[in-house]
Image (cartoon, coloured by chain):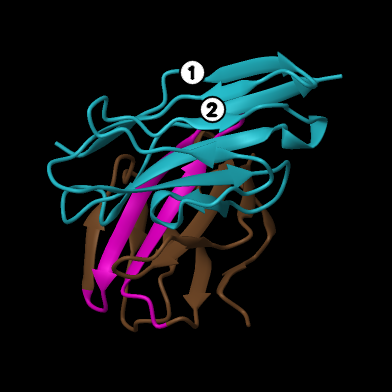
């Protein structure tokens, strides 16, 4: 029973590098989300998707991109990493009338 | 507008004391509300949802439509309750997909 799986768990990037955070869910959920959580702070929504082929910006989308080519996958792309993007990233999925299920998080450090 | 407000960023109590984490919401219609918990370095997980009216780990939350509140309560706090707590609202459409989180309250239970 995998649920929501994020990879990698940890990553260190140099300023200007790019990377993709992977997220996949096996619950056939329509809704998927990417959040970031800065130390001692709450969740901030980066992007979300209501279904395959549909994505929209959340509260803090700058510096990120997403795609949703399948129901299962919702990768988050950082094109030019900056120190301000050092954070813990959480992917989540949900369906209509269900709670959200979260991945275990990706701890990203940009140096 | 659909919104969830958690007015306290940090709540500190002593072991055995009652605890109340506040959550207010803004939503037209009948809301579905949840409390999520995040223990140190773990993924967010559902604590309880108002439609189930259950008590989990001694916590309860009652929906008060008149006050548009969904406060989380526990009569006797334990050290293992120390965690980050998020109130969430199941909305429809809007800028945050279908799940709207508050900013979170960090509960610290001191011995």
Q: Is residue A38 left or right of residue A104?
A: left
Q: Percent x, y for residue A2?
A: 62, 79
Q: Nearer the viewer, residue A45 or B3?
A: B3
Magenta-drawn stretch contains A29: yes
User: What residue is shown at x 22% (from left), y 77% (from top)?
Assistant: A53
Label 2 sits on residue: B105
In the image, is residue B25 part of the stretch drawn in magenta? no
Foreground of the two, A30 or A35: A30
Chain displayed in cyan:
B
Q: In this rendering, is residue B109 above or below B33?
A: above
Overall secondary structure of the magenta section: strand
Numbered badge on residue B8: 1
Region of the chain picked out in magenta, as a range: A28-53
Mark 2–mark 1 CB contact (< 8 Å): yes
Residue B65 visible in the picture: yes
Residues under labels 2 and 1: Cα distance?
A: 6 Å
Q: Secondary structure at mark 2?
A: strand
Q: Quadrant of the N terminus of chain A?
A: bottom right
């Amino acid at each position: 029973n995998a649920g929501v799986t994020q990879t990698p768990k940890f990553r260190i990037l140099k300023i200007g590098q790019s990377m993709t955070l992977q997220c996949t869910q096996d619950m056939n959920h329509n809704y998927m989300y990417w959040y970031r959580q800065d130390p001692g702070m709450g969740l901030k929504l980066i992007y979300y998707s209501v279904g395959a082929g549909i994505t929209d910006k959340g509260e803090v989308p700058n510096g990120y991109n997403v795609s949703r080519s399948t129901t299962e996958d919702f990768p988050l792309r950082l094109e030019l990493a900056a120190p301000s993007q050092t954070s813990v990233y959480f992917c989540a999925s949900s369906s209509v009338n269900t709670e959200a299920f979260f991945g275990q998080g990706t701890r990203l450090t940009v140096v | 507008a659909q919104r969830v407000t958690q007015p306290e960023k940090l709540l500190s109590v002593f072991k055995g004391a009652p605890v109340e984490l506040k959550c207010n919401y803004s939503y037209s219609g009948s809301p579905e509300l949840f409390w999520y918990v995040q223990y140190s370095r773990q993924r967010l997980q559902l604590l309880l949802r108002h439609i189930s009216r259950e008590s989990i780990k001694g916590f309860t939350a009652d929906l008060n439509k008149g006050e548009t509140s969904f406060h989380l309560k526990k009569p006797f706090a334990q050290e293992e309750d120390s965690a980050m707590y998020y109130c969430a609202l199941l909305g429809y459409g809007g800028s945050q997909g279908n799940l709207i989180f508050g900013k979170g309250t960090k509960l610290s239970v001191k011995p």
